[in-house]
């Protein structure tokens, strides 16, 4: 499901890699960088909880950003068009604040304990390396940026 507007969109995880690849190519052509923010909640969550967390991410995403689920325990926010690392750092802070606190679904409160990590592209970045770096930072695994 490709976005036809510049509003933040939620895309299936299977489409995120292609979306990141296109964003990286567009950003290189414009002398900008692509950011990826990974959110890891450690253990699989019920679908209803994941939908709430995706909606929370989408609520703070900028125009043109995309969010999606990349694994049973993880979400991803694609942030194209960044000019500097500080812009990604500010977005990571916003994501962390937005996802803090329990998720209420049908009268049941689910604690939300997640880790957040970000990575920003450079001229030689690949989709896999960018996602791996963000995910590694979110989960505490050491990765090369």
Image (spheres, helix red, strand yellow):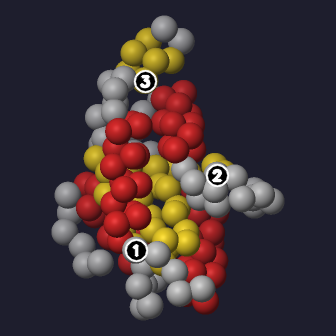
136 shown above or below 32? above
* Tag shown at residue 84: 1
Label 2 sits on residue: 8
Q: Secondary structure at mark 1?
A: loop
**Mark 3 or mark 2: whose residue is earlier in sequence:** 2
58 shown above or below 144? above
* Tag shown at residue 103: 3
Q: Secondary structure at mark 3?
A: strand
Across and down, in percent, residue 30 comes to 60, 85
Mark 3 against mark 2, which lies toward the viewer? Answer: 2
Q: Dot 3: few (<14), some (14–19), or many (≥20) neighbours within 10 Å?
A: some
Query: Residue at (57%, 81%) from the top-left corner?
Result: 27
Is 121 on the left-hand or right-hand side of 57? left
* Tag shown at residue 135: none
Considering depth in this image, is 71 or 20 the residue closer to the camera? 20
Q: Is residue 47 visible?
A: no
Query: Residue at (34%, 43%) from the top-left corner?
Result: 96
Q: Dot 1: few (<14), some (14–19), or many (≥20) neighbours within 10 Å?
A: few
């Amino acid at each position: 499901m490709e976005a036809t507007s510049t509003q933040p969109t939620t895309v299936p995880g299977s489409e995120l890699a292609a979306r990141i690849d296109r964003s990286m190519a567009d950003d290189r052509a414009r002398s900008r960088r692509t950011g990826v923010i990974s959110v890891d909640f450690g253990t699989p969550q019920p679908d209803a909880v994941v939908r709430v967390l995706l909606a929370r991410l989408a609520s703070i995403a900028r125009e043109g950003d995309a969010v999606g689920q990349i694994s049973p325990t993880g979400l991803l926010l694609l942030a194209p068009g960044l000019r500097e690392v500080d812009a990604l750092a500010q977005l990571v802070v916003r994501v962390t604040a937005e996802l803090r606190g329990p998720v209420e679904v049908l009268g049941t409160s689910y604690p939300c304990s997640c880790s957040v990590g970000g990575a920003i592209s450079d001229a030689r970045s690949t989709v896999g390396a960018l996602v791996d770096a963000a995910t590694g930072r979110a989960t505490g695994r050491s990765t090369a940026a």
